[in-house]
Image: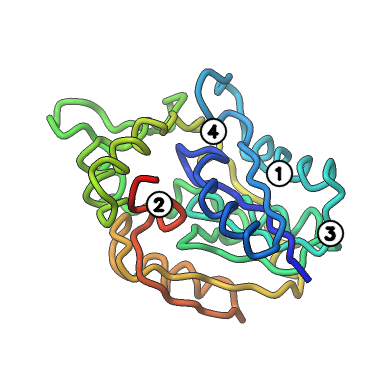
Amino acid sequence: MGKTFVLCHGTWHGGWAWEEVIQVLRKLGHYAVAPTMAGHGPGVERHGITHKDCADSVAECIREHELRDVIVVGHSWGGTVAQRMVAELPERIRRVIFLDALVLNDGERVFDILPEVFLKSLRPKNGNASPPASENSAVLAPPPWETWRDNFIQDATEVVARATWGRLSPEPSQVNLDALDLKRFYSLDVPKSFIYCRQDQAMPPGFFHPRMSARLGEFKLVEMDGSHEACLPVQPN
């Protein structure tokens, strides 16, 4: 019997980031959806968008499609949204999977755990501009081309790297500034998995695994080859 997947995209992305994965899952007989969260994608309102708004986008998708026995997958920042899904709709969640994802402790904000070396990599390479994200900025700008190419998607062809970089959109900064109440997430006995991509260079070594993965308590670890953008194709169609 096919499984049901709800896929949570990462920072600067939209549901488009999962297009190839959805095609593969459907060919295997599964059902998969990847909603674009509030404040994400081109030409949308970003001011005032909160982390809750993003999580509500995914919850609405699950309820609207009357999905149950769901496997929620969170990539990168999307891991924090996956945590909220488990807490909000535990009766509908079969398993939660973190794909080289952020995992917050109760009361933490995303900005609390981002390494300085990562934030530095988001600065324009001319070195003259201010960091693209702070307590006072409205959006988190996409990474410079060099950072995207070398740190996020270094295993893809130049054509794919350029095309996907061009689809990235600014991120509403507030989603990274909201402290999350995750007491219920850590109280629930929902099966968890963590997928670790061995060639991920978006964060310093050890950040995703074991630092983030260890926060889950008991979980299944799956290792695979791939960059941080493992959900994206490496070759053009």
The reply to whether the C-beta atoms of the residues labelled 1 and 3 are less than 8 Å apart is no
Image depth: mark 4 or mark 2 in front: 2
> Horizontally, is 171 left or right of 235 in the view?
right
> Looking at numbered disc 1 in the image, what kind of residue is underneath it?
Val
Residue at 68% from the left image edge and 39% from the top image edge: 52
Q: Label 1 crowding class (10 Å Cα cut-off): few <14, some 14-19, many 20+?
A: many
Q: Is residue 175 left or right of residue 6?
A: left
Tell me how far mark 4 sits from mark 2, CA to CA.
30 Å
CA separation, marks 2 and 3?
29 Å
- Residue under the image location 21 percent in, 32 percent down: 124
Q: Nearer the viewer, residue 22 or 7?
A: 22
Mark 2 lies on residue: 233
Q: Are marks 2 and 3 in contact (CB under 8 Å)?
A: no
Query: Where residue 193 sits in the image (x, y, percent)?
Result: 59, 73
Eye-nearest disc, 1 or 4: 1
Q: Which mark is residue 77?
A: none
* Crowding near the residue tagged with mark 4, few <14, some 14–19, many ≥20 C-alpha atoms within 10 Å: many
Residue 195, position as x, y percentages in the image: 49, 70
| Nearer to the camera, 182 or 168 | 168
In the rendered image of this protein, does residue 226 appear above or below residue 158?
below
Q: Earlier in the sequence, mark 1 or mark 3?
A: 1
The answer to whether mark 2 and mark 1 are in CB contact below 8 A is no
As drawn, the label of residue 68 is 3
> What's under tag 4, amino acid-wise?
Gln
Whether tag 4 and tag 3 are in contact, CB under 8 A, the answer is no
Q: Nearer the viewer, mark 4 or mark 3?
A: 3
Q: Which residue is mark 1?
A: 58
